[in-house]
Image (cartoon, rainbow, N blue to C red):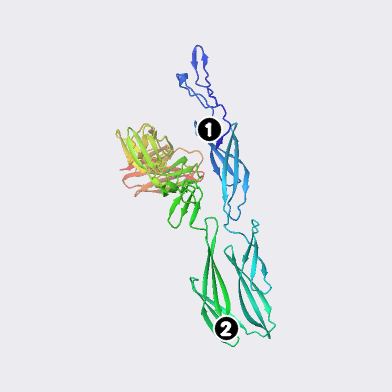
Amino acid sequence: MSQTKVAKRTLVALLAVLCVAGSASVSSFSTAGAITAYAGTNIEDITPVTDHEWSEPKCIWVSNEEVYAEFKCNVCCETRKVKADVQLTSHRDASCFTDGFSIYTATVNFNDNVYTKREYFTHRAEGKHDYSDPVWNWSDDHSAASAHFVCERCGFEEDSGAVISSEVTTDGEDTVTEYTAYVVANGQLYTDKVSIKNTEPTETRTVSWEWTDSLSAALATVTCGNGKNETVQAKVTVDKHYATYRSVGWVTYTAISVVDGIEYHDVMCVVLPKNSMVHYEEQKPTCTTSGIIDCWLDLDTDKYYLDPECTQEVSWYQVDLPELGHDFDSVTWHWYKDLKHAWFEAHCTRCDHTIKTPPFSTTCKIENGKVIYEVNLPSTFVGNNKKYRDRKVIDLKTAVPDVTYEKGDRAVKLTWDSIEGAQQYGIAGYVNGKWKLLNTTPDTSYIIRNLTPGTEYKVAVVPMFADRWNTNFTKAITVTPKSVNVIPVQTKIIDHKVGIKWQPVAGAEKYAVAALESNTWAVKKEFDANTTQWTTPNLAPGTYRIAVVAMVNGTWQSSDFRNRSFEVTIK
């Protein structure tokens, strides 16, 4: 596009200095340019706000009714797409042998400037007249005829003399002479027939023709009314109208045979297409297709020329315009959660094509306390010579989860947020002055079991990167399971019996005394809510583990017999 009006651009610089009690600070200053300076920043270091600096627009010609101008700022790379007003400013229809054209002008008003773009479209000539059916004029004796043609496209008129042939056939009891006129015009064979009733007895005679495939020879077989047949070799004349690169041509084959002094004619016509010169209009290359300059190709010699007269020969390399390849301005990498794979998505600013690749494996390394993941896009996926890569950097000092926990019976449940790139998580416990790996999990929660109530445990969650544990225990926490609600019990051994007395439990509906037998707790006796003591029957000498539990809200409080139990020894 050409710029017809150039607007004067100015750079606007905005500085603000707030002075409070003799000290300067601009830490809260912001403007439309999103510029923020912090205390201690030199005023000269602040980038001033500037106007957009628009480049010459790129024309996007979708159709003769839909054209856009795309502007790109040279400062911030912002792009704007503006629809143009398109007008047909000049037009000429193609005639039979003269090309036509249409000139469209696209106009865009943008940023106080006017931009125009003109496109020239050629309408190729047909290379022949568009004749309607001719008007035939016969001589009185039907020995001659002519055809008058009028072109419906350009009005051209033409008279062509005809070749006449005749046959005698029967029409009931009468005989008729049938005259056939042959005219070749515009590469097409036209015929007309006239039948005249004979006033005197005339012998019938008909003719049939047989041509060779090349049309270079023909045989005429004349059949008379008495059944006699005669076949003679015809004389074939050739009339050739040469084709040009603008018009078609044709070859007329006329066969003449003489039998018993009578001439018989037949006509064949072959159309010749426009000659071997092919005209290529300029085609601009696209991202995926090559283009070509305006040129002519001689199909017989396979040579290219800049003119139809073949005076300016050029090579194929001068004619061909290689494809441009995609111009991916908007590129996005999508990473998988474990950072082991990533896929590429990009949008071409030139052709609006969007590419989405399959996932690619990433590389990983650890340097200077950081985990670095990298991915590279193979050039075969984008069709240009640009290289696209991305990386993720994880600082091992901060890549440690914050852990919370929930108390349970002899257990705690640890919960934490996921860490980007972590392969799995290790559950570590501080045992005998050292950190020990207790277990691993891919999840973000874990239950530590078999803990002793009332005991504190120091634990941490550490992530694994690149098959190595991040042994950073700075976010370790101390946990403890739920406390056990033990019913206060008094015991007294008399002879071989054990007297048990317990204090009432608020809300208790029942009580039960259970004993541990073969590692299984067995209920020995149940009591109502008013009973708070019981004496066992005689027991054999030995040590017994006994527990007293209460039923509250229909549920036995027996989730942890061991921590609610006590031992008695019978001697």
Number of residues whose C-alpha sits closer than 10 Å to that of mark 1, classed few (under 14), some (14–19) or many (20 or more): some
Q: Nearer the viewer, residue 203 or 408?
A: 203
x, y (%) of residue 321? 45, 46
Is residue 552 visible to us here? yes
Which amino acid, by three-letter code, is at mark 1?
A: Trp
Q: Nearer the viewer, mark 2 or mark 1?
A: 2
Pointer 1: what residue? 54
Q: Secondary structure at mark 1?
A: loop
Horizontal and vertical percent position of residue 187: 57, 63
Q: How many marks?
A: 2
Which residue is rendered at x = 56% and y = 30% of the image?
Answer: 6
Quarter containing the N terminus: top right
Q: Is residue 429 left or right of residue 288?
A: left
Query: In terms of image quadrants, where is residue 485?
Result: top left
Residue at position x 59%, y 84% in the image? 224
Residue 494 appears in the figure: no
Determine which residue is flagged by label 2. 223
Point out the tag, 2 or 1, that comes first from the N-terminus.
1
User: How many other residues sit within 10 Å of disc 2, few (<14), some (14-19) or many (≥20)?
Assistant: some
Q: Amino acid at mark 2?
A: Thr
Eyeballing the image, is 168 above or below 39? below
As drawn, which residue projects farthest toward the front? 261
Please tell me whether residue 365 is drawn above or below residue 358 in the rendered image: above
Q: Are marks 2 and 1 in contact (CB under 8 Å)?
A: no
* Residue 307, x across and y down, in percent: 49, 49
Query: Where, quadrant-wise, is the C terminus in this rendering?
Result: top left
